[in-house]
Amino acid sequence: MTDCVCGDVCFGCQPDYVPDQVPPTKGQVAAIVAAAAQEYSVFPAEVVGRCRSARAVKARRMVIDHLRAHWPWLPLATIGYYLGGRHHSTILWALRNGRRAR
């Protein structure tokens, strides 16, 4: 098993896993958000809320990256829904901006 923020939350961490295009459950997303929030010392409500602090934004970005890595077929609108109802273009901007910043 590779090093992952979700631990045993999703099967995407396992190399022999073949996705069957089942979206993550709300419980899985909540666990991923909680792990990212703990990593950046913020509350999960800050990650999915309107908070614009640098730590909350980094945690949110970590969630987006994790969801895209393990569920690459997941629509951006769905990821936005999981992150407090954000518009799909906000998620797209985060993905593009993150690549540029690295």
Image (cartoon, rainbow, N blue to C red):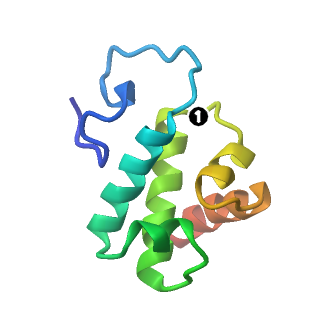
Say which residue label 1 marks: 72
Q: Percent x, y for residue 100? A: 59, 68
Q: Does residue 102 appear anywhere in the picture?
A: no
Is residue 81 found left or right of 69 in the rendered image? right
Q: Residue at x 78, y 60 (%)?
A: 89
Q: Determine crowd level at label 1: few under 14, some 14-19, many 20+ residues with C-alpha closer than 10 A.
A: few
Q: Quadrant of residue 20?
A: top right
Q: Does residue 45 appear anywhere in the picture?
A: yes
Nearer the observer, 45 or 60: 45
Q: Quadrant of residue 48?
A: bottom right
Quarter of the image for the N terminus: give it: top left
Q: Amino acid at mark 1?
A: Pro
Q: Percent x, y for residue 76? A: 70, 46
User: Vertically, is 41 above or below 48?
Assistant: below
Nearer the observer, 67 or 45: 45
Nearer the observer, 90 or 50: 50
Q: Residue at x 76, y 54 (%)?
A: 88
